[in-house]
Amino acid sequence: MTPGVRPLIAGNWKMHGTLRDAAALAEAVRAGAAGTGVELLVCPPFPYIHMVAAAMLGQRVAVGAQDCHAAAKGAHTGDVAAPMLADIGARYVILGHSERRADHAETDAAIRAKAEAALAAGLTPIICVGESEAQRLAGDAEAVVTAQLAGSLPEGFARAGGVVAYEPVWAIGTGRTPTEPDIAAIHAAIRADLVRRFGGAGEGLRILYGGSVKPANAAAILALPHVDGALVGGASLVAADFLAIAAAAG
Ligand SMILES: O=C[C@H](O)COP(=O)(O)O
């Protein structure tokens, strides 16, 4: 944790569940949120955001999206614009997740353009970075992450309280995590990069860890310096697990 920074525990529901599942999960998270001292965020699939945001209105749980388009509107069939997300109650948007980088060939420049659109719409971007297993084995993890930050962080990111999520690609959904010293080293490098880029404002920006965070490992990971929360995939689909991770952060 970074002293004075309120942790953010974010659930990325990815492309899972039915409308009924989303409603039940949202209700269970809402009901359990009161007991946690951290900021909670859930990011449902696009079709469920409006319903979940309505359920969370006035509650302690923020709602976000998993992507947005770089344009504010226009002829982009199948895409969703940042102002639309803000309009239906989203406050955050995850950008540059490795699954989007892989499935949709998203580049750092494309992610930066989306982040600019998010900021213009009043959404807080959560920009994901992280190395592949081959890159880690080659000793390039820090260089990869630093290059991704250089390419994807937009102007105004710090002013808007933007969030960085470090997600080693090989740790996502695998049950494997980097060692604690390895997580701490990358988070320290990200912090140094944010401070170089944004000065003192970079000290207070939240850096999340993501990749196989579970109730069993959350406390140890969240206790590391510069780990200011978690971006949780699989475990965020089980309200009790998500809330247990939040409790570990609090
Ligand atoms: O966005 C979340 C991450 O991809 C982590 O997913 P996971 O917790 O299932 O490993």
Image (tube, rainbow, N blue to C red):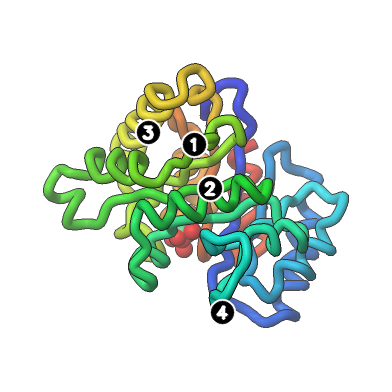
Q: Amino acid at mark 1?
A: Glu
Q: CA distance from mark 2 to mark 1?
A: 8 Å
Q: CA distance from mark 3 to mark 1?
A: 17 Å
Ligand 1 under 8 Å from disc 3 Cβ = no
Mark earlier in primary sequence (2, 1): 2
**Mark 1 element type:** loop
**Percent position of residue 73, x then y:** 62, 66
**Mark 2 element type:** helix
Which residue corresponds to the image point at 58% horizontal and 66% vertical from the top-left? Answer: 13
Q: Which mark is residue 116?
A: 2
Please indicate, yes or no, whether residue 214 appears anywhere in the rendered image: no
Which residue matches tag 1? 155
Ligand 1 under 8 Å from disc 4 Cβ = no
Q: CA distance from mark 4 to mark 2?
A: 20 Å
Q: Amino acid at mark 3?
A: Ile
Q: Nearer the viewer, residue 136 or 202?
A: 202
Task: Please tell me in which quadrant of the rendered image residue 248 appears.
Answer: top right
Which residue corresponds to the image point at 80% horizontal and 65% vertical from the top-left? Answer: 27
Which residue matches tag 3? 190
Hey, which residue is sitting farthest right in the picture? 58
Which residue corresponds to the image point at 72% horizontal and 80% vertical from the top-left? Answer: 19
Q: Relative to residue 49, is residue 104 drawn left or right?
A: left
Label 4 with label 2: CB-CB less than 8 Å: no
Which residue matches tag 4? 78
